[in-house]
Each structure stands twice: as structure tokens, then as C-alpha cells.
Amino acid sequence: MVARKKDKSSASKVASDAKKIEFRVAAPKFPSSQPIVSIGASADELLAHTELQSKAAFLEAQVNASRDGILVIDENNKRVLVNRRIIEQFDISPDILADADDTALLKYVVSLTRYPEQFLEKVMYLYGHANETSQDEIEFKNGMVLDRYS
């Protein structure tokens, strides 16, 4: 394959069977972000993707800057978001965080509570009633008391 530079953000390659493949690379403004390689995407699509990635990074930074522990679980019991504060509060291991399924994390946190059956019952209720709001205090074996808002 031979790469031909078209402009600063796109290039093409001609394969040995003479098919031309267009591709573009976008470099987001955040240093930790990986360049985006898109085959056949327009410049507008790449710009929209880069803007969306920038907004997501900004929101993630906001969530991680919060003094509150934030945990978001979807309707399939998959962890959508967990911020640094909640990881610190519960000293959650990387092994538990590696699994997006909430089962291991829930089991771990239940083991830390002073009243595990009551805690688990409330969690299961909230899972089944996602549109309801709730506020309660959770007592832990180590003496910590947390306000939970769901």
C-alpha cells in the first residue's frame, strides 16, 4: 500500500488491487486521548466525534472532582459510571472495578455494611423502581455513616 497525503487530517492508501481507501485522523485537545482514525467518515463526522469526546472528558472530570461518591448502574446492572471518591470511600480493588457487572461490587459493599440484609433489600428495591427517588443513611461496620441519595 502507498499512502498519499491529501491535507493535514486525511490521507488515502491504494491497495495492491488498486482500491482506494480514504481515512482521516483527528487528534483531540486532551493529551491523554488517543487519535481517532476513521475510515470513510466525513470531516464533519470527525469534528462531531471529537467534540463529543471533549464534552465527555469534561463531564468525567467534573464527576471525579465531586466530594460525593457517585455510582451509576444501568437497567442491566452494568456499571455506567463510578467516580474516584466512591473508589476511595470503599477501598474498591482493581479486580472488582475491572468487571462492569455490578454484582461483585454490590457483594463487596454489602459486606461492609452494619445491616447487610436491609441494605441489599433497599438496593434491590431501587433497581426495580428506577424512577423513584430515595434518601437514607447507611451505617458501615467501621463506623462510617453515609447519606445515600438515589
Image (cartoon, helix red, strand yellow):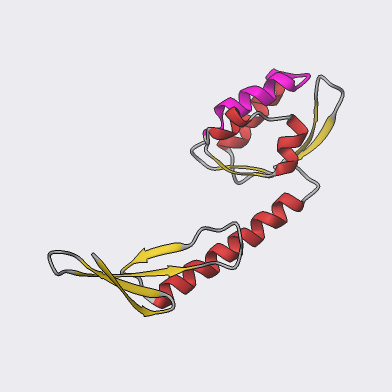
Relative to residue 141, is residue 9 drawn left or right? left
Residue 14, located in which quarter of the rendered image?
bottom left
Residue closest to the far bottom: 7
Q: Is 24 drawn above or below residue 133 in the view shown?
A: below
Which residues lie in the magenta part? 101-117
Q: Is 74 drawn above or below residue 37 in the view shown?
A: above
Q: Where's residue 75, x and y in %?
A: 51, 41
Residue 123, located in which quarter of the rendered image?
top right
Query: Total of numbered circles in the picture?
Result: 0
Q: Where's residue 3, x and y in %?
A: 29, 70
Q: Nearer the viewer, residue 145 or 127?
A: 145
In terms of secondary structure, what is the magenta stretch mainly?
helix
Residue closest to the far left: 17
Q: Quick one: quadrant of the C terminus? A: top right
The reply to whether residue 125 is in sight is: yes
Q: Is residue 102 magenta?
A: yes
